[in-house]
Image (tube, grey):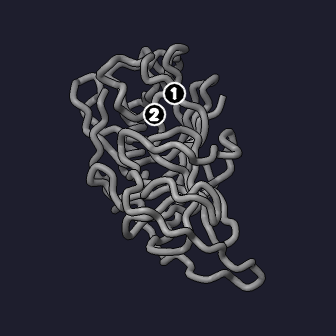
Amino acid sequence: MTLRLREVDRTAASTAVRPAPSTARPGQQPALPARAAPADLPVIDYRSVPGGFPPDPTPQSTAALTEGLRPRARLAVYDAPGGRPRAFLPPSISGVPVTVPILMRRGGWVAVLLPSINRTMGWLPAGRWAVQPLRDHLILRRRTHELTWLRDGALVARWTVTTGSPATPTPLGRSFVLGRSTPGGAVYGGLDALVLGSVPDDRHAVPPALRGAHTGIHSWHRGGSFGKSVSNGCIRVPKSGQRRLLSAIAPGTPVSVVD
C-alpha cells in the first residue's frame, strides 16, 4: 500500500495552540545560541531524512508525550542544543501540516521526533513554532497484538490487531501520526488510513510498490488476520475501531510500538 498523505480533520480533536517560548523561564539556564543554517540544507520530506541526527534515547518508553511542535515556517533542525544544523523541517509535508511530538527540553531547546526515519530526534531552538497539546496516545504491543488507545492517560479502547510479519515487522519505537491517506482497494474496508512517521526498517523486505511508503494504521476486509503477525508492517484494525480512531486522532498523536 502506498500511503498518500492528506490532512486529518482536526474538528474532533482540536485544542488550542500556544506560541513557542522565546526566553528561558525563571531558574533555567539561558538558551544556547543557534548557529545560522545554510540555505542549501536538505529539507525533510515524505521520502527521507538526512543523516547526522541523534537516536531517540528511550525508544521503548510508553510515557505520555503531551506536547507537539507545529512549525509556522521552515525551521532548521539541529543535532544537539547549540549544535550543527542538519536539515530543514517544513511546516507541511505533502501538503499536510506537520505536528511532531516534543520529547524533552534542554538549554532553551526542544527535542522532537522526526518523520520519515525511525527512532530519531532533532533539536530546535525557540522560534517560529507553536505548541500543540497532545491528549491521545496509541500503544501497540507486538507480542500480544494489542493496540491500546489512551486519552489523558485513561483507557478509551483496546483492540486485537494485525502486526507485521517476521520478515516485515512493525517498526519498534516511538512514532506519531503524520496524517491520513485514502488507500485504494476494497481490502482496506473503504476507510482512510492513519499514516505514521515511521517507515519499514528494511525497505528491501517489502514489495517494491511499498518501499517508499510509511507505516500505517488501517482497517481490513477480513477479520481472520487479527491477532496474527502477517502484514507488511502496517497495523490492521477492525473497521469499527478504525472509524473511532479516524474521528478523534489528530496529527502529532504519539504511537509507541513495544514488544
Q: How many marks?
A: 2
> Pointer 2: residues within 10 angstroms few (<14), some, or many (20+)?
many
Q: Quadrant of the C terminus?
A: top right
- For this orientation, the residue located farthest to the right is 27
With 150 as the anchor, is 186 left or right in this view? left
- Give coordinates of residue 153: x percent, y percent: 64, 54
Q: Is residue 9 above or below residue 194?
A: below
Q: Is residue 34 left or right of residue 30?
A: left
- Observer able to see residue 197: yes
Residue 201 is tagged as: 1
Residue at image position (47%, 44%) is 50
Label 2 SS: loop
Asked whether 155 or 5 is in front, the reply is 5
Which residue is at the front of the view, 238 or 82?
Answer: 82
Q: Is residue 210 above or below residue 28?
A: above
x then y, percent, for residue 246: 36, 46
Three-letter code, disc 2: Val
Q: Is residue 45 above or below residue 226?
A: below
Question: Which residue, given by chain and number where applicable, does mark 2 sit on?
Answer: 199
Tell me what residue is drawn at x 64 percent, y 63 percent: 81
Residue at the spot x=66%, y=73% of the render?
32
Which residue is at a point 45% across and 34% down the rendered structure image?
Answer: 199
Q: Are marks 2 and 1 in contact (CB under 8 Å)?
A: yes
Q: Tell me residue 5's x, y (percent).
A: 29, 44
Q: Residues within 10 Å of mark 1 (few under 14, many from 20)?
A: some
